[in-house]
Amino acid sequence: MFYTDGILVKSTLLEGDGVFHAFSTRLGGVSTHPDTTSMNVAPGHGDSDETVRENADILVRTASAGRLGVEAALVTSQIHSAKVRVVAEENRGEGFFVHVGEHCDGFVTDRPGVVPIVRTADCVPILLVGRKADGSPVVSSVHAGWRGTVAGIAAEAVRKMTEQGAVIGTVKSAIGPHIGYCCFEVGDDLYEAVRDIRGEDFARRHIRYVGERLHADLTEMNLEILLSAGVLPENVDVSDECTMCLNDKYHSHRKTHGKRGAMGSLVGIL
C-alpha cells in the first residue's frame, strides 16, 4: 500500500529492517524557479547545481531519518535504456560532487550507505528490495520510460539483483507515481515500436483505444515484465497516482510541455 509521509511517498511493502526508500513529490524543497518549485533533483531546468544538491540532501536525509545525506547519493544521465549498473561505495557522490558515472537507467547495490537515485517527471520509477540467503538486503532503483519499459529494464534489475545474491522469492517491488493510462496518449509509431520489440500480443494488451485515441499502459507493462522475471504477484505494489493528473503534487513533462523539474526515487541500505 502506498501512503504519503509528509513530503514523500512510500510503500509499506518495501519497509523492513535495514532499508529505507522514498518517492519524492514536487513538495518540500528549496527551488524557487516557477517551473521547478519546490523539490527538483535534476539540473538543466532552471535551478543552480547548489540548489539541486540541497534538494537531494533534503530528500536523502528525510528518507533515511537523518542518517545519510547527499554525500551518500548518486545519479547519472538517464538514456532510456535497459542498462542497470551495480554500484558500491566508490560511486557515492557521482552526479553531485564528482563526474557523472557510466550512463544507465537503473542501479543495484548490496552495500550500506550507497543511495542510488533515479529521476522522473512522468516516466515510471521502480524500487526493489530483495534479501540474500543470510537475510542481508540487495536493492535497486529504476527509471523506466516507455523505451526502457519495453526493453525490459525491470526484468534486468531483477536479474542483476539475483546475480548479487538476492533470492528471487524475496524480491519486492514498488511501482511509483507516473503518467497513467488515463493520460498517456500515444501514436501509431509507438504501437509499432512496441510491437516490433515485444510482439503483437504485448502491444495489443497494453496499448488500446480510449475513444479515438491510443493510450499506453506503462503500469501494466512493467507489472507483466516484473512477474515474468519471477517476482511474485503479492510482492508488487503499484501506485494509482498519475503525475499528469496531479501536477500540483508531482512534476509532469507532458502537462507542462517540458517546463518542469524532476522527482527523485531512492532506496538504500543502512
Image: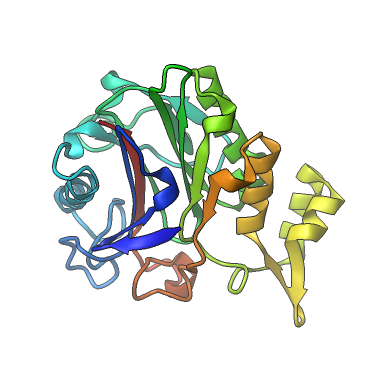
Q: Is residue 21 left or right of residue 49?
A: right
Residue under the image location 35 percent in, 66 percent down: 260
Q: How is the image coloured?
A: rainbow
Above or below, comparing residue 57 to residue 268 in the picture: below
Q: Quadrant of the C terminus?
A: top left
Q: Position of residue 227 (x, y in %)?
A: 67, 42
Q: Nearer the viewer, residue 139 or 199?
A: 139
Q: Is residue 266 left or right of residue 177?
A: left
Q: Position of residue 93 (x, y in %)?
A: 23, 31
The single residue placed furthest to the bottom in the displayed view is: 211
Q: Position of residue 183 (x, y in %)?
A: 58, 73
Q: Is residue 176 left or right of residue 185?
A: left
- Quadrant of residue 82 in the image? top right
Residue under the image location 39 percent in, 74 percent down: 247
Q: How many marks?
A: 0
The single residue placed furthest to the right in the displayed view is: 200
Above or below, comparing residue 116 to residue 207 in the picture: above
Asked whether residue 116 is in view, the answer is no
Q: Quadrant of the N terminus?
A: bottom left
Asked whether residue 157 is in view, the answer is yes
Above or below, comparing residue 187 to residue 91 in the picture: below
Q: Nearer the viewer, residue 135 or 111?
A: 135
Residue under the image location 77 percent in, 73 percent down: 209
Q: Is residue 84 left or right of residue 65?
A: right
Q: Position of residue 12 (x, y in %)?
A: 40, 51
